[in-house]
Amino acid sequence: MKSLAGKFIVIDGPDGSGKGTQIDRLAAHIAAEGGACVRAKDPGGTAIGDRIRHVLLGYDLAEMDVRCETLLFMASRAQLVAEVVRPAITAGKTVVCDRFISATCAYQVAAGFPREDVIRLGELAVGATWPDLTLILDVPSEVGFERTGRKPHLVKRGRAEAGQFAMFDGATPDAMERRPIEYHRRVRQIFLELPQFYPGAVRIIDANRPADDVFAAIREALSDAPE
């Protein structure tokens, strides 16, 4: 891979796509090559961001308006960029982040928030600090459900079933299980559409294959990324 010093890399994708495994491998690879890697997570990653994350994790999102939900995510990102991402980039380190605004483009837009408003709010929250490259690990929704141990229930649509819990590690299984499979299919489809409207470079990686093959594709995407 070309030098990733001073680069901001995001790995995102549907639930069960294997983000955690690939982030571990990429961070280890950067370190083995003598680079300095700073890992970040979204939402959270700072003391203030973790408090916002607690609000998003600890309450029934069926009672939260999607606009409030989206603004909370953006508030967490504003703090993450100011406190973690920008200082690391300035110091010549590589930032590898688990999810970012790309996730809100998929999950909140699937819940009914206009995608152009997501981008506009993102610009207010992070300014010019958008990822140099966003890697979307793509898996069919049914595969993601199987990997996370959930059953793809078909349930009635509505705000109560279209919340955000499934984005988070540590979310309660009951809350995740009541997300309809149709919602997750829509989330996946929006992830696949990101290269058409998302600021910065986006690469789609087929993650429905062995982890070694996925990481090889990630390395290739990073090698081909624009300077």
Image (cartoon, helix red, strand yellow):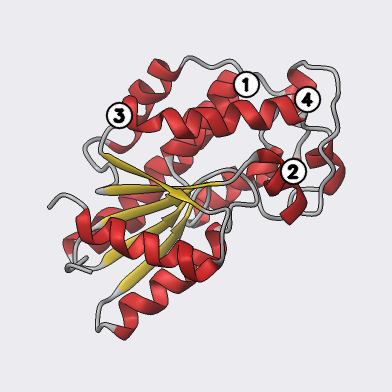
Q: Which circle's residue, 2 or 3, is located before the other in the chain? A: 2
How far apart are labels 1 and 4 at the CA level? 9 Å
- Label 2 crowd bin: few (<14), some (14–19), many (20+), radius 10 Å: few
| Residue depicted at 42% across the width and 56% down the height | 97
Q: Is residue 56 visible?
A: no
How far apart are labels 3 and 4 at the CA level? 29 Å
Query: Label 4's element?
Result: helix
Q: Which circle's residue, 3 or 4, is located before the other in the chain? A: 3
Residue that numbered label 3 is attached to: 123
Query: Label 2's element?
Result: helix
Query: Label 1 near label 3: C-beta < 8 Å?
Result: no
User: Would residue 136 be found to the left or right of residue 113 on screen?
Assistant: left
How far apart are labels 2 and 3 at the CA level? 27 Å
Residue that numbered label 2 is attached to: 58
Query: Label 3 near label 2: C-beta < 8 Å?
Result: no
Q: Relative to 210, is 86 above or below? A: above
Q: Which circle's residue, 2 or 4, is located before the other in the chain? A: 2
Q: Amino acid at mark 2?
A: Gly
Q: Amino acid at mark 1?
A: Ala
Q: Amino acid at mark 4?
A: Glu
Residue that numbered label 4 is attached to: 161
- Residue sitting nearer the eye, 61 or 27: 27
Q: Relative to 78, is 34 above or below? A: below
